[in-house]
Image (spheres, helix red, strand yellow):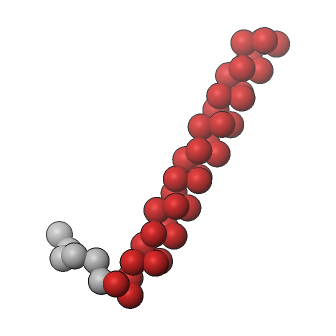
Amino acid sequence: MEGPIQIKDYHPFLLEIKEKIITARHQAVLAVNSRMIFLYWG
């Protein structure tokens, strides 16, 4: 396991976490929309 994060590494680390959250949200929205379409029209 690595030690504590250095200040110089914090910004890229934070951007990476935010990007992963946004990607996960988009995937969730697509999955829900797909399921809703299937329920209504399938």
Residue toward you, 31 or 3: 3
Q: Look at 17% across and 69% down and name the residue there.
A: 1
In which quadrant of the rendered image does the C terminus lie? Answer: top right
Residue 34, percent from left and from top: 71, 27
Q: Look at 55% across and 61% down and name the residue there.
A: 19
In the picture as drawn, the residue positioned furthest to the bottom comes out as 8
In the picture as drawn, the residue positioned furthest to the front comes out as 7
Q: Look at 45% across and 69% down and name the residue there.
A: 14
Q: On the picture, is 35 further left or further right than 12?
A: right
Residue 32, percent from left and from top: 65, 28
Quadrant housing residue 39: top right
Residue 33, percent from left and from top: 71, 29
Q: Look at 59% across and 44% down and name the residue there.
A: 25
Q: On the picture, is 4 further left or further right than 38?
A: left
Give the total number of marks visible in the rendering.
0
Q: Is residue 42 above or below residue 24?
A: above
Residue toward you, 29 or 35: 29
Q: On the picture, is 15 further left or further right than 33?
A: left
Q: Is residue 11 above or below residue 30?
A: below
Residue 13, percent from left and from top: 42, 72
Q: On the picture, is 23 further left or further right than 39?
A: left
